[in-house]
Image: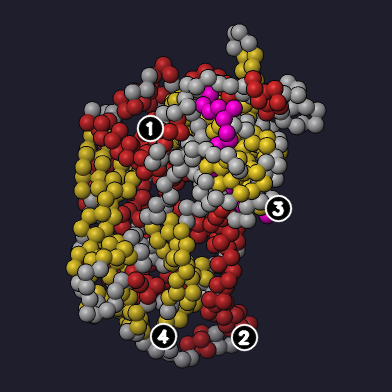
Amino acid sequence: MPYLTKAIHLANRIYRLHHPNHHHYRLGLGLPYYSALIHHNFCSNSRKKDDNNAIDLSQYPTDKIRNFSIIAHVDHGKSTIADRLLELTGTIKKGHGVAQYLDKLQVERERGITVKAQTATMFYDYNNKESNTNYLLNLIDTPGHVDFSYEVSRSLAACQGALLVVDAAQGVQAQTVANFYLAFESNLTIIPVINKIDQPTADPDRVKEQLKSMFDLDPSDVLLTSAKTGQGLEHVLPAVIERIPPPPGKRDSNLRMFLLDSYYDEYKGVICHVAIVDGCLRKGEKISSVATGQSYEVLDVGIMHPELRSTGYLLTGQVGYVVSGMRSTKEARVGDTLFHTRTTVEPLPGFKPAKHMVFSGLYPADGSDFEALSHAIERLTCNDASVSVARESSTALGLGFRCGFLGLLHMDVFHQRLEQEHGTHIISTVPTVPYIFEYSDGSKVEVQNPGAFTSDPKIRVVASWEPTVLATIIIPSEYVGVVINLCSERRGEQLEYSFIDSQRAFMKYRLPLREIVVDFYNELKSITSGYASFDYEDSEYVASDVVKLDILLNGQPVDAMATIVHKLKAQRVGRELVDKLKKFIDRQMFEITIQAAIGSKVIARETISAMRKNVLAKCYGGDVTRKKKLLEKQKEGKKRMKRVGSVDIPQEAFHAILKVS
Ligand SMILES: Nc1nc2c(ncn2[C@@H]2O[C@H](COP(=O)(O)OP(=O)(O)OP(=O)(O)O)[C@@H](O)[C@H]2O)c(=O)[nH]1
């Protein structure tokens, strides 16, 4: 099947981007699993937990450990399955009252998506015919959305296997494909799980066929579950133990610890999630970082069960947390290797830093809140190292930040977290992608901000390039026509078109990144009644005729509203922006002209006529309280206005133009 070869090739590329030298990390697979040596040092008792509920990890040599992840297309039930497994092993109480335990962030609960990958350690008594053995299982939950594939690959680095969860009614979707290849190329054992078999529209046999034809997964290996009713879940952990190999690594080697993730805790400081690849780590020891060269003392070490549980040590193959007096998560570089100070180790292959696909300016809605915003961004990026932040200033919005995100959802989630978790009100500018421009003076620059586009009239743009993505779209066949229209309207080039079964089409497109960051996914969903699934990976830059589109209010350019668009679309986008602004900017005491322009050429124009002075008095002449209320409201509203020249622009105007593509 040509698709399969191509998909493997693409997946290889994604994988290499994320795991430049990953094969070294997996080299140890198949090594004998040690236990005796260190086992002696720690094994003072053989119980899992003593009377004080302390956890004795020493009874889990690597052959009693399994590290696995759950990967799936968004909404196919990863977090619910994770919950059920945590309940099944007694890690959390049944009906703990909070749906999806591992989705801790408020935004995750509200949007029902997983953003930050979380880890939990479970203890499981496995009874087979021969014996009853207690295992330590580390479950690493991963995000499902396209924007967060960086987190998925990070999580997979600590695993030897993955449950590939597919919805029994929806079948294989775009991210199932992407996630499968991420796991496959990481040499993980894949356990296919068809979930939601309780649904009336479930068709597990059809999904089994898809798994066979797309990934060559044997139908007899597939587990059938309903995370809702609990049906079939009892087979999941036995399959994990029987099919997934234990972690490789040597206990008698020098410590090598892989830094998976980190976050900042008010009380404990920086908490690092780590996987012990070789050796052991104990409280009180000195560790150093390969990336920064800094050394620390281990103040606390333990497992996530699912809350932090101090154990005093972690052994080879185990996954847990370390507190070591790091002052900021900037010191905790994801993918870093930590080792015992004064030992020499071969660093583990790290990760490629997150690639920022979308940039936007973030400004305080109220100019005086700059410090508060700065503080909130600092705190939030402590927990989300995949956001890049640089200071910038705008004539319209004052001091702010230019932030780089993995994608639009990532940007939305970041905004929402700023508001919810830190109480900040922000104005964000139109998202842009990084373009490359070659100017007539011979210079070639990457432009992440339309404001940085040269304004020197003596310098011309000689050539420009824009980033593209390779997009995978899976849709029921009846939507093929509308999707092809949408993609060509978004300047897409079809690369492949085939069927994965009798009802579903698979399409591969090259699309300009600019075209998908602005509302593409929503539109795709809406024209396909929600049935389309979509995933993308970044691809090369291609030559493209793009121009800077300025918005002027009474002749003054509003830098925060400038955007870079393809020449062919400039006219339409300019018209739409001007129309939207007209709707949102209130009449003021004077006439306002709104213009969209490329250089000195105006391509769209609207005017808002002046307000008559006594309009307020006329409307509310007699009623003093209503008038007062209105003035109060207006005062409140003023706070959320930005002034350019003499024109007040409400915050909503900035929001409204975000979705013009
Ligand atoms: N009927 C049915 N619904 C299920 C089942 N498993 C999960 N769900 C529901 O499907 C929805 C999505 O489940 P999640 O567990 O949040 O899915 P997810 O894959 O973790 O989603 P992300 O975290 O966003 O990637 C929720 O409303 C669940 O209650 C199941 O077996 N049967």
- Name the element at disc 3: loop
Residue that badge 2 annotates? 624
Residue 366 — which label? none
**Residue at mark 3:** 267
Using the image, determine if residue 81 lies above or below residue 33: below
Crowding at dot 1, Cα within 10 Å, few <14 / some 14-19 / many 20+, comes out as some
Q: Secondary structure at mark 2?
A: helix
Residue under label 4, please give it.
645
Q: Earlier in the sequence, mark 4 or mark 1?
A: 1
Separation of marks 2 and 4 at Cα, in angstroms: 32 Å
Identify the amino acid type marked 2: Val
Mark toward the viewer: 2 or 4: 4
* Span shown in magenta: 246-267
Mark 3 near mark 2, Cβ–Cβ under 8 Å?
Answer: no
Q: Which residue is mark 1?
A: 185
The x, y position of residue 258, in whole percent, is: 53, 39
Q: Residues within 10 Å of mark 4 (few under 14, many from 20)?
A: some
What's under tag 3, amino acid-wise?
A: Tyr
Q: Amino acid at mark 4?
A: Gly
**Mark nearer the N terminus (3 vs 2):** 3
